[in-house]
Amino acid sequence: MSEPYPHRHHAIDYMEFTVTDLDLAKRFYAEAFAWQFNDYGPGYAGIRSPHGDSAPEVGGLCADQEVRAGGPLVLLYSADLDRSVQAVKDAGGQVVGPYEFPGGRRFHFTDPSGNELGVWSEL
């Protein structure tokens, strides 16, 4: 049996995305990043941790009529940025970039509900 994952003080512990179409959002994130979900009814899906079933969920998708503008920018890491760009495009995301920044390269994208996220990698 594995040890439970501790919550860390002042660390990002959970991210919740408001989405206008829960099924479309789940399909997008599954196709683009291979995310898996725990369904909690018609209006919510938890994002499973990539560390396995014993780890806590890392976030959730919450269905609502509209997405609130101005939320925090969430950055994901990629070991192959160009492949991630293509995966986001193939899943239906709108991509800006990639471009270089001090320490690496990154791109921003919007999902089908209009949430903006970024993906970065080292040079």
Image (spheres, grey):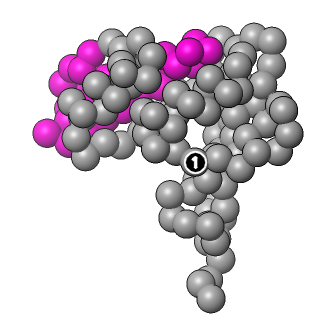
Residue 69 or 52: which is nearer the viewer? 52
Q: Residue at x 56, y 15 (%)?
A: 112
**73 displayed left or right of 20:** left
Q: Which residue is rendered at x = 57% and y = 48% of the image?
A: 36
Whether residue 115 is in magenta: the answer is yes
Amino acid type, callout 1: Gln
Q: Which quadrant of the figure contains the N terminus?
A: bottom right
Residue at the far bottom: name it. 1
Residue lying farthest to the left in this orientation: 123
Front residue (pair 89, 97) = 89
Measured as percent of width and height from the top left, residue 34 is found at 46, 44
Residue 110, magenta (yes or no): yes
Residue that carries the numbered disc 1 in the rendered image: 36
Residue 19: % across, % down: 69, 22
Is any atom of residue 68 visible in this view? Answer: no
Between 116 and 61, the one lying in front of the other is 61
Range of residues picked out in magenta: 97-123
Q: Main secondary structure of the magenta part?
A: strand
